[in-house]
Amino acid sequence: MSSQRVVLVTGGNRGIGRAIAERFVRDGYRVAVTARSGEGPEGTLTVRADVTDAAALDAAFTEVEQQLGPVEIVVANAGITKDTLLLRMSEDDFDSVVATNLGGTFRVVKRASKGMLRARFGRVILISSVVGLYGSAGQVNYSASKSALVGFARSLTRELGGRGITANVVAPGFIETDMTAELPEETQKQYKASIPAGRFATPDEVAGVVTWLASDESGYISGAVIPVDGGLGMGH
Ligand SMILES: NC(=O)c1ccc[n+]([C@@H]2O[C@H](COP(=O)([O-])OP(=O)(O)OC[C@H]3O[C@@H](n4cnc5c(N)ncnc54)[C@H](OP(=O)(O)O)[C@@H]3O)[C@@H](O)[C@H]2O)c1
């Protein structure tokens, strides 16, 4: 049964990743989360890992495999922003965002793919952002790291699509988490005015799309970019 499958969500201790892990638990999956700090929600196995550290990730995967079994569904969710205008953006602002958002996805998916190939089943779900294809002033680093996930998922689809493995991108718009809470109130107001839905989304609205992509119903969807953005990025 699909709901018995093993899921790993990176950055499952808070925000969107936590909501995704909660929803998988509710649907009866066996769920592990990686966290640098804190714990995943009730009913999950928390393993420690920084996604910029391949050795730590490998150890985390081994622990999940020993306790729950091979990872069949992986959600690459861990991500950061370091917003500033291009002229002020330091090498570190750029490199650290790319190393976490894009490099982290590479490390996690590479490690997960071993078990998926063996099982001839896998669901790879990458959490991008509306900003990846829409663009955003002050987010050259973040936007580049997030649009790269589209090429990643589509290349993976061509590479592993014949082995029962799908790879899709979920592109959230503005979601109520710590990441958006940091934005000044006036900026939040302006963003809401530009979103056709007129509001930000809850993390659970993203989680519902992720669990659907992981289900047997979506087995013929691969290389897709699914927006969860209230219409903000239409056409991009
Ligand atoms: N919020 C939004 O409006 C929005 C919109 C579009 C896309 N997204 C994307 O959705 C994802 C989750 O965002 P969020 O809003 O839930 O963010 P958040 O509340 O800031 O949480 C980020 C998560 O990523 C983890 N993380 C960051 N760097 C990591 C690293 N090097 N290694 C391991 N874990 C790391 C954090 O762990 P710690 O707690 O240890 O820091 C935390 O669990 C991100 O990829 C983000 O880009 C968010």
Image (cartoon, grey):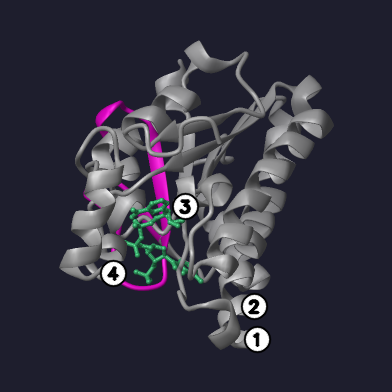
Q: Secondary structure at mark 4?
A: loop
Left/right placement of residue 53 relative to residue 8 reads right
Mark 2–mark 1 distance (CA, rounded to whole Å): 6 Å
Left/right placement of residue 77 relative to residue 19 reads right
Q: Secondary structure at mark 2?
A: helix
Q: Is residue 44 above or below residue 165?
A: below
Mark 1–mark 3 distance (CA, rounded to whole Å): 23 Å
In this rendering, which labeled residue sits more in front, label 2 or label 3? 2
Say the numbered circle drawn on residue 38: 4
Would residue 43 be visible to someone looking at this image?
A: no
Q: Earlier in the sequence, mark 3 or mark 4?
A: 4
Residue drawn at (64%, 48%), measured in percent from left and top? 149
Check whether the beta carbons of the residues at disc 2 and disc 1 lie within 8 A of each other: yes
Disc 1 target residue: 91
Check whether the beta carbons of the residues at disc 2 and disc 4 lie within 8 A of each other: no
Q: Is residue 64 above or below residue 101?
A: above
Say the numbered circle drawn on residue 95: 2
Residue 164 location (% of width, % of height): 70, 21
Left/right placement of residue 212 relative to residue 226 reads left
In this rendering, which labeled residue sits more in front, label 1 or label 4? 1
Disc 3 target residue: 77
Q: Confirm whether the magenta stretch covers residue 31.
A: yes
Mark 1–mark 4 distance (CA, rounded to whole Å): 29 Å
Residue drawn at (28%, 52%), measured in percent from left and top? 191
Check whether the beta carbons of the residues at disc 1 and disc 4 lie within 8 A of each other: no
Q: Which residues are magenta?
A: 25-46
